[in-house]
Amino acid sequence: REILWLTGLVLLVMTMVTAFAGYVLPWGQMSYWGADVVGKAVGAIPGIGPGLEHVMEGSDALGDVFIHRFFVLHFVMAFAIVAIVGLHVAALHISGSNNPQGVEPSQPSDTVPFHPYYSSKDMVGLMLFGIVFAALAFLWPDLLSEPANYRPANPLHTPTDIEPEWYFFPFYGILQSVPSKFGGLLASAGAVLVLFAVPWLDPSPVRSARFRPVCRIGLFGLVVAFVVLGLVGRHHAAGAWMIAGRCATLYYFGYFLVLLPFAPRFEKTRPLPSFLS
Ligand code: HEM
């Protein structure tokens, strides 16, 4: 089950890298300046940073070499994702699916076959996704995109607000809430990396948050903190947004590094059900 969790997170990271690399390709103002911010953040890593930045960008100025490298990264990564999805499903077949109760099925009658039950359930999700996706693509193509990216990249003109695509807002919020450049990079990368440690951070014998009142409230707080960080990323961390961003960043890391390991010591869990349904 740990491998299942870890391959899932590898997929998340690969998708984030693919999406970032893809956003560079239209070579608009946001593509250029977003790449500039990330390149400088990589360059701020002590020791290896400048070398890594140079390998990533290919020359002293973002241009031809950089786009070629990122185009190759973009599609190779996208195909590699398909391979890792295969590993992810293989790992699922070894550990078996979880359930909302977090209790291992004890007899065959506790489980149902994937087809027709889950295939039809997944089809509903797929259709809903298809409807929203088609509506965005065909009716409101500009709803989630940044108009500034229609302007061709111009190294001589910095946009007033450089911001990533909406799905990176929470991590951008963390990046901005930390005053030092390298500290910000460490915190926003750490926000993803800490997820890799979750199977070992949570020692509770009770798996489902349904039976863990403290963990449940904490998890609700985590969702709120993540949304707040997204808003901070959207509005730029200054004034009240800065304070909100710092509090939410502290809570985010506090949830994983303090609440998860220590709550099971005092949390009174509710009794687990003896059957699954
Ligand atoms: C996980 C899979 C993928 C993700 C998440 C992804 C994401 C993205 C994103 C966010 C953009 C920027 C779109 C824009 O702002 O206009 C983009 C552009 C692009 N992607 Fe992908 N992509 C994926 C797979 C692929 C694959 C497999 C290919 C080709 C084999 C590809 C080729 C391109 C090209 C050529 C562009 C530039 C389009 C333009 O300049 O208008 N992508 N991608």
Image: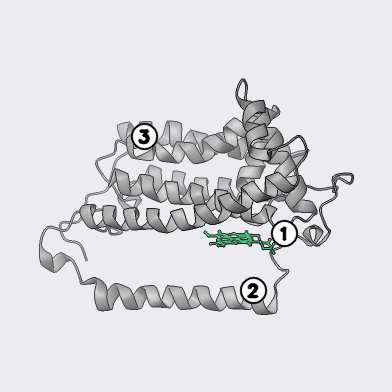
Question: Residue 201 bears which disc, if any?
Answer: 3
- Residue 148 is situated, as x and y percent measured from the top left of the image, at 81, 58
Looking at the rendered image, the disc whose residue lies closer to the viewer, 1 or 3, is 1
The image shows residue 56 at horizontal and vertical percentages of 64, 38
For badge 1, the amino acid type reads Pro
Callout 2 crowding tier (Cα within 10 Å): few <14, some 14–19, many ≥20: some
CA distance separating discs 1 and 2 = 19 Å
Question: SS of the residue at dot 2?
Answer: helix
Q: Amino acid at mark 3?
A: Leu
Mark 3 → mark 2, Cα distance in angstroms = 39 Å
Disc 3 crowd, CA 10 A, few/some/many (<14, 14-19, 20+)? some
3 or 2: tag closer to the N-terminus = 2
Give the CA distance from mark 1 to mark 3: 41 Å
Instruction: Relative to 276, say whether 4 is above or below.
Output: above
Which numbered dot is residue 26? 1
Give the quarter of the figure containing the C terminus.
bottom left
Label 2 sits on residue? 136
Numbered disc 1: secondary structure: loop
Quarter holding residue 85: bottom left
Of mark 1 and mark 2, the one earlier in the sequence is 1
> Within 8 Å: ligand 1 and the Cβ of disc 1?
yes
Q: Residue at x 85, y 50 (%)?
A: 154
Q: Is residue 165 at least partly visible in the picture?
A: no
Q: How many marks?
A: 3
Is 266 above or below relative to 14?
A: above
Q: Quadrant of ligand 1?
A: bottom right
In the image, what residue occupies the spot 73% across and 48% down?
64
Question: Disc 2 marks which amino acid?
Answer: Leu
Give the mark nearest the N terminus, 1 or 3.
1
